[in-house]
Image (cartoon, rainbow, N blue to C red):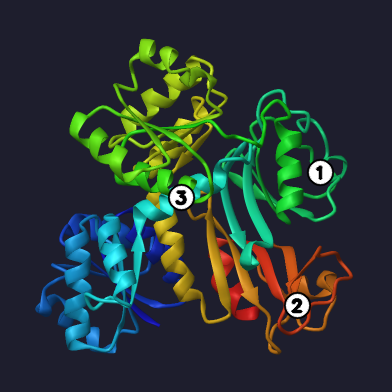
Amino acid sequence: MRVIIIGAGQVGSSIAASLAPTHDVIVIDADGDRVDSLTYSIDVLPIEGDGTSLSTLREANIAGADLFIACTDDDETNIVSCSTARAISDVFTVARVKKETYHQTWTETGGSFGVDFMVCTNLLAAETIVRIIGLPAAHDVDVFAGGQVMMAEFCVPEGSPLAGQTVASADTFDELTFAALFRDESISVPTGRTVIEEGDDLVVIGSPESTHALAGGLTPEQSSHQEDIVIIGGSQAGVQTAKLLQERGRHPRLIEHDHDRARELAEELTATTVMESDAMDREFLNREHVDEADVVISALESDEKNLLATLLADRIGVDRTIALVEAAEFTDLFEAVGVGAAVNPRDATAEEIIRFTHGNDTENVSLIEHGSAEVLEIEVDADSVLTDRPIRESTGDLPGKVVIGAVTRDGSFVTPRGDTMIRVGDHVVLFAETSDVAAVAEAV
């Protein structure tokens, strides 16, 4: 495909890195230095210019493009860019927005603004947070095959019963695959003899039941039934998180410092207790028994405030903390200093958009470790190298480090083993390094 990306920030860079090996990618940004720096590591065509300008789009040959992705940090720029692109071409347009009102308008009108697909960053971040809640030790969770398969990335905490065990002894679950292990910035595919160490990041793929069972084994002191949930900050992401929790029958508490905003949210969030206060006021936190909360989620407008709020919550005795982190480079830092999980909205946005680029057979995509690896759900067709062959034989024809973590067939979960035969129509959920994803997707 010929793909035009407007915006060379974190989202645009992640998408460009995923597409560049197999597609013609053009990246447009008003900041010429940022676009030029991207080309040092990624094979893309850089254009310095305004993505809403007709002359810039014509310079990028918009008429010959297959996919147009507008993912700057400004909602209006993204929407106008897509509208302009559609006015002079038949390209498929994708817009990233932060405001849920734009996404709601687009959804309820059956598509508008000249946008074929719209991704709401705050909504995706909220969905990620809600998936993480209830799965102790996990800092990334995604679901595949209509909810039949779960992918989770766990950090092995200090003192975990699994630390020091081999994968063979730790893998006591009927429907689970240890797909990958991240240690000291390196990726490995674990074998039965691999010893799990404190601080390792484990990527597992399996049924929700087995994944939850593993989570309980990693941190037996934490309950998976986390009902007392406190959200700090009435930001759009915080509000979307509260709404999703309400839809699931939860009754979260939300702390908002601004008086007018607190009153507005109290009327909007009918099943959420809205408290007007400074989340850094320790006396208030003790008075409202926030220290007894199962989970505290910080969704303030700055990374620094989110870090301080979650560290304070941890200090007063909260079981688990989750923080929004806008800067990707801070994500690992947050988790290293004690934040239970750091959710980067831009990562969630990038993986939602990348799903469009892997072909019609790719049903879902999840980015791992800021895009260094991916988990894909692919529907197998007759041309796949996996079809009608046992897994131990067919995976040898796949490039790089590939692990088949789960298979669903006719609505049923199948635990993949060496002698498992893959059939046409099966949905395969697999792990692969990003550098190999395009070749893997083509082969499967």
Disc marking residue 19: none
Circles 1 and 3, Cβ within 8 Å, touching? The answer is no
Q: Quadrant of residue 198?
A: top right
Q: Residue at x 75, y 79 (%)?
A: 386
Measure the alpha-carbon separation of dots 2 and 1. Answer: 30 Å
Tell which of 189 and 350 is nearer to you.
Answer: 350
Q: Residue at x 42, y 43 (%)?
A: 242
Compared with 284, 433 (above or below) is: below
Of marks 3 and 2, the one in the foreground: 3
Q: Residues within 10 Å of mark 3 (few under 14, many from 20)?
A: some
* Helix, strand or loop status at disc 2: loop
Is residue 214 visible to us here? Answer: yes
**In this rendering, would 427 be left or right of 333?**
right
Tell which of 107 and 361 is nearer to you.
Answer: 107
Q: Which x, y percent locates residue 34?
A: 23, 55
The quarter of the image holding the N terminus is: bottom left
